[in-house]
Each structure stands twice: as structure tokens, then as C-alpha cells.
Amino acid sequence: MSFLAPLYLLLGGAVAVPLLIHLMRRRIGARIEFPAARYLLRAEREHSRTLRIRNLLLMLLRVLALLAIAVAAARPVARWLGAGHAPTALAIVIDNSLSSSAVVNGRPLLDQYKAMARDVLSSATNADRLWLVTIDGHMRGGSPALLRDEVARLEAIDGAGDPTAALARAASAVRGAGLEARQIALVTDAQRTEWQRTPAIADAQLLIYSPSARPPVNHAVTLAEARPTRWTPRGAVAARFLSSDSTTYRMTINGRTFARGTAAPNEEVVVRAAPAERGWVPGTVEIEPDELASDNVRHFAVWIGPAPSVSSSPGAGSFLQSAIDVLRTSERIAQGHDINVVSADELASLPGLIMAPADPVHIGAANRALERAGVPWRFGTRRTGETSVSGPGFAGVNVTARYDLVAQAGAAAETLAVVGQTPWIVAGPRYVLVGSPLIPDATNFPVRASFVPWLGDVLSERLVGEPGQAIAAEPGATLARPRWADAIESADGQRTPLGESIDVPTRAGTYFLTRDARRVGALVVNPDPAESQLDRLSPSALAARLRAGRTLTARSANEWSALAFRAAARRSLVEPALLVALAMLAIEGVVIGTRARRTVA
Amino acid sequence: MESTRARRADLFDPASLAALGRIEIVARWIVDGFMSGLHRSPRKGFSVEFAEYRPYQAGDDLRYIDWKIAARSDRWVIRQYEEETNLRASVVLDVSRSMDWSGSSLPSFARGTGALERLTKLAYAERLAAAIALLLLRQRDAVGLVRFDDRIRSAIPPRMRHGQWRRIISALEESGSGRASSAPAALDQAARLINRRGLIVLISDLLMDMPEVERAMRGLRAVGHDVTVLHIIDPAERELPASGEALFVDPESELAVPASIADVRAAYKNTVDEVIGEWRSMFGGAGIGYEIVQTDEPFGVPLRRAFAARQLLP
């Protein structure tokens, strides 16, 4: 047995009071003149044995009562008996990921989790330290009443959340509580895709509950994507569905249905469209609702507008000219002078896709043209020899002849591709600069299949003067703020200024990014498609995956509630000590009452 | 009925009644009330019986002249009553220090809340003695008084004459309250004062040695005296009140007994009952009347107990 507040044991000194009263009672008290004192003396002589025993009993009862109160104040805990539980640092981790909104037995799983959490909180005492941690990263500590309110407000998010971070946060909280008994009580659906990583939980007992029933059969939209992101004004929407059989779907743009159909399992559906809307608009791909309704809708965003007009110079090369013709044919670009595709030595104005001149003789003229146009880059040393290019979309691209791109003062550009450590393609405001001529003698990029789409994106998205783009994110994630946006617009049209980062909303949907109150991009929030895979780990498999020092696995919700606060083998002896004190005082009352009744009789 | 009872002074609260006047006055009220009660009782006729007339002789008390006969026949005759002077009584009053005590003098923690003021045992006994004396004198019995503590304080021989009542009252008003009680000597003195068989009424708290009292009592009985003992007890002596711890000191012997009232209350009550039983047994064995008189009882109660049982009432 040990004491959490041993200083209170000093209260045990109070037992001296009844002892002194017992020992000194014959020397204290008033002097009373009483003629019948002889009868009193005779009574004491005749009943002295009974009186002594009774007084001794009363003294012992009072001493024991005081000792029990002192022991209770010192908050004893012991392994061998006790009621309630030792003061415990308990973090309740509730999996409120998208899958927790699945309806099982007529109600969402999360409702069951909340009821379980309330049960546990009702068993808490003021000596416990409590936290409520959710998968979406929120953590709140406080009294049972406060956390009960938090539980009542809890809702499922539309994403997977970060269970590893939640458990790590819970472990950190209970570790810092300064209590010997530490427990993390986790309630989750043990979704196989959710518990991929294995957080290490040291110094705390992990109590796990996961439903043993099979998860419901789920249908979901796992892909909804505008291709390309900028429609001029034609484009396509690609969709894929999670289903064991064919699924009927519906596609909308700006709330208007533009396509319906039936898709085979795991088939990618591509639907082309040329809607009348202009600018950034939201779109959805939807299927019939099922037990998990949150993943039956998937959002996308698309920019719709006229095709940019492009002119190309003869120095750009025949491959580039052919690619531009393909883009014109597909109406992604038009003939005109909005964007120039030129060799650097022929550069007259921006915006433009600028390439190094094919003839090294013109490199000086090219650098002078760059200077005149205000492009803060210069062509440096010419390099030859085959080297591979690194960068998104540049797989398999090699370069045999190139110029080093030398940044000038004030150059603020985005590097799109590198050769080794050297930039090969850089982009800045209204320009994209390539360190090689786009001809087969210098690089195989113009003959790669990825060339035309890349060129289309550069011309129709990067150089059109609209810097924005559609950013895909999962609910609750945190993103770096894009430079081209200064506010985010919610579905109801309310704009919130952006800070250094964006806290992605926990609700799925399309949120527009604005600059100077004008839509310049979109934040498309959709759950991780893996969250729609409801396959569960068995409780033992989940316990094995979560590397905790001590793990308890509850087979039922009631058992989970009952095992909470059992982190320590030791239990509180406060209540037993108080019961002993009360018992002693009750017996004392009975003894005194018996004497009083005899007296009255 | 209620109003009739309320006017009877013998049924008043002793302390309240004593506060209204001196011993003499109070005793008269008590006796008047007591006699009134008797006349209203079914026991009518227990008065001093008329016997005969006899001619008036010089020196006879003028109160006993039958004035109606004198008016009709011009003859003065005296009404003669049966046994009008047969009884010679002596009231033996304990005025020791233990008698000068009342439970009202206890500290509040021991007395308890709500306790009424009470006469000391001595004050109660003095008024009771005066009432007894007056009652007997009105029956034309000769009454005397002996007051004692550790010695004889005063002794008035039994007389029936005019002024005897005044002498008794004067003696009762003397200060007393010595230390100890010495009843045997007082009882011997009382017996000597009654030169023939008579009534001796001992009024005492009996806080004295039983063998000595028993020896003296048996002596009185041996010479034919009728003896009645009125054992005066304050209710606080019969049953310890309230609670508390204190050093209980006998004012006569300075015997000090520390005790917790709550602890010894039951045992004390048992002991007092045992003592009373012992006194009752001893007096009963000797043919002596014995009555417990608590100082919170109206004076009429002990008067009736003391005399009604012995057929001495008028």
C-alpha cells in the first residue's frame, strides 16, 4: 500500500485527542456540589468493569475513526483490495474517421462510440486526468462534464484522419500527467486501410475495442477528376467506383446533371462535356446512398473558358509545331497571339514558351532577348552528352544537348525539371524557359507521349495568365498556402483570409481559392479512397499492429467501459477507509445510544 | 373542577408556592388546601368526633364555648371532642448541609436545558414540617420540633397550647445547615421530649449511615412510638440529568467522585433504587412508615402519603 498524499497522514496525530480525553477524563471537568456523591461512588464501584470496557471501546472506536479519516485523506492505493480505481491519466481515443459514420444495426458506429465514451467518463473521479482525442487531430483535456459535452458535439469527419498521430498525442498527454496509472482507451472499427502504420505506445496501457461484426458492404466513388483541369471549353470527367457489381452514377457541374450512366466494377468511366459555365465551377460524381453515405459523392473542380490563342515561330521546330497543331485540333488552344512559342533569340514579348536556340551561334542574341523581355534567366555553358531528366511527368526523358540556366538577380521561378542538379525547365510569371531546343537532336522529349499533354498544360494552364489550379486534399489535412491565392471561399460564399498554411476543412466538398475576391483556383476535398475499404482487422491483429507495452482487448462495449481505469493493479482505498470511519462512528453511536436508552429506561 | 384544583395551594408547584410568602403563610395555605381537599373527598366524617358537653370552667378556651346553647339557655357549655389531645407528635427535621441543596444549582451542562427552579431539600422540608405541625395542631394534637445536623440545633417539646405554632415557625426560620447529619441523637432527643407514646415524623434526605439510623429507629419503636420517615430527594439525585463530565463533591464529607454523567447515569439510577429499596426494607421490617418525597411534588402529595395511610387525618 502506498499513499498519493502522504503528508495528510500527519492528521493521524489527531488520535491523541480521544486518547487524552480517555486518559485525562478523570482530571478534567467542573467541580459540582452533589450531596448524593456517595451513591455515585457506589455506582461506579459496582459497575466499574462495565464502564471501563465501554469507555475503552468508545476510545478505540474514536481512535480508529480518526485514523481511517487520516488514511483516507492521504489517498491510499493498494494492490490487494479497494474500491473504484487509482487516480488515472486516461485518454479516450475515438475513431471518428469517415468509416465511423457507417450505419450498423440502425445507427452510426460513432453513436455507439460516443455512448461508450460517456460510460467511461461517468466512472471518472476528480482525481483522474482525462483527455478526449479524435482521429482528426483534435485533443481536449478537462473534467468529465466538459468532455461529456465534447463527446456530444463529436461528428465523423469525411476522411481517414491520422490515427497514428492521435495515438501519439494521447500517449504524450497521459505520459505528461504525472500519474502512475496511464491508459489509452481506443475505440475504432479497426479498418485495415486505416491502421497501416504502427505507432509505438510506451509507458501506457492500451485498451482496445473494435466491433466484431462484419462491416457492411460498401459502394463508393473512388475517383472523380476533371481532365484537364482547364476546359477550353471542352473537357472530360473521369470516375471510378468501388462496387462488387455494376453501379449507376450521376455527374454534375455547378449542381447541374450533365451525365448519367452505369459503370462496371473498377471500370474507369470518362465522360466528355462542353458545359456553358465559365470560370471555376464545382462538380460531383454521385452514386446511390448506402450504409456509408459519405463516400457516395466525390467532388472535383474545373475551370471552363475559351482556349488560349498561340502563335509559334519557325525556330521552335517541327515537332513542337506538330504538337501545337494537335492541340488546336482538339480545341485546347486556338490560333492567335496570346502566347508565343519561340526560340529565345526570336523572343519579342511575353507570355511565352521559350526554348534555347538550336544554333549555338544565336545564344548571345537569345540572352539579349531574354534581358529585353525581363526574363531573369540566362543561357550559360553549353553541355552535351546524354543525361536523364528528373521531374513530374518527365520519366524517360533524356537530354543530349543543353545550356545551363543561370539565374539572374531577382529570379523567382519554379523549377519544372532538372538535369542532375541543374535546372532544365524553369517557369516564372508569364514564361516557361527550356534549357534545350525542343528538337530530337537535343532531347527525346518532343517524341515522348507525355510531350503533347505537357505542352497543353503549359499553354492552357500555366501561361494563360490565370495562375490558379485545383488542389486535391483530404479532410483535416494541412497544406502550404499557394502564392496565387489570398482567401478561401466556402460553399456559402463566405471568404476567409489565408494564413501561411491552409487547414483543409473536415467536410468534403469544393472550396474555391480567391485572389482579390476573384476565383483563381479550387481546393477539392475528398476522402482517401482507401477509407471506403471497410475491411477490418481482427481485435488480435489490431492489438498486434499497435505496439503497446500492455494491451487489453475488450470483446464488447460493456467490457471496454468496465476495463477503463484499470491501468494500474492498484486501487484506491479512499472509499474503504471512509467506510471504516463511518462504521466506527456508527458503532460508537450505537454504543452511546444503547447507554442512553438504558438511562431513559 | 380544574379551577377548584388550581385554587388548592397544596397542589401548587412547591417552588412557585414558596415564592409567595414566608413559611407560616405557605404552611397555612397548604393545610387549608389540604383540608379543603379532604372535605371534598368521599371520606367525609373523618374529623375529630364530637363527644359531649361539659360546663365551662375558668381557663377553658373560649373558642370551644357553644354559643348557640349559651344564647338559648344562658348556660356556658364547652364542646368536648374525642381524643382531642391523645396524640403527641414530634417532627424531626434534618437541617444538615446536604439538605441545603437543589438540583437547580447544578451547572447548566449538567442540569440540562429547560430544568425548572426547585426548592432546596431543606426549604421544602421546612415548609412540609410547618404544614404537618399546623395540621396536627388543628387536630388538637401536641406537636413539637427537633432540628438537627451534626448536633441538635433546636428542640421544641410537643405542646398543643396557643403559640406553639408560632414557636415552631420561629424555630424553622432559624439558620441551620451544619456539616454532617446525626439522626440517632436527634431521634433520641425527640423521644425524650415525648413523654409518652406518640408520633415521630423524621424528615431527612437520609444521607447518613443506615445502621445507626436503624438502631435509633428500632429503639423508638421499642418504646411504642409511631414513626414515619419522609425521605426528601431532589429529582436530580434520583436520576442524573443531562450529560457532561465533572468532579462530584459531597458538601458534608468532601467526598469527591469524578464521573462522566453519560457513563454512570444508568448505574447511578440503579444504585439509588437499590438504596431506596434498602431503606424501605429496613423501615418496613421495623414497622416504620417510609415515603419518598421529591422536591418537585406539590406539598399535598407527601402530606397525604404520610398521614392518610396511618388513618391520622382529621
Image (spheres, rainbow, N blue to C red):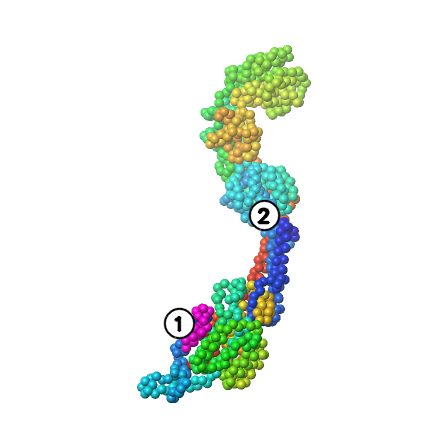
Residue A586 in sight here: yes
Query: Of B57 and B71, which appears nearest the observer?
Result: B57
Asked which quadrant contains residue B254, the reply is: bottom right
Asked which quadrant contains residue A117, the reply is: top right
| Residue on which the image places disc 2 | A127
SS for tag 2? loop
Distance (Cα) linking label 2 and label 1 = 73 Å
Q: Position of residue A307 (x, y in %)?
A: 50, 20
Q: Residue furthest right?
A: A385
Disc number placed over residue B7 in the picture, else none:
1
Query: Of B229 and A263, which appears nearest the observer?
Result: B229
Q: Does mark 1 fall on the same chain as mark 2?
A: no
SS for tag 1? helix
Q: On the picture, is B55 further left or further right than A25?
A: left
Task: Report the amino acid beneath label 1.
Answer: Arg
The prevailing secondary structure element of the residues shown in magenta is helix
Residue A444 in sight here: no
Residue at the spot 61% in from the left edge and 49% down from the top edge: A86
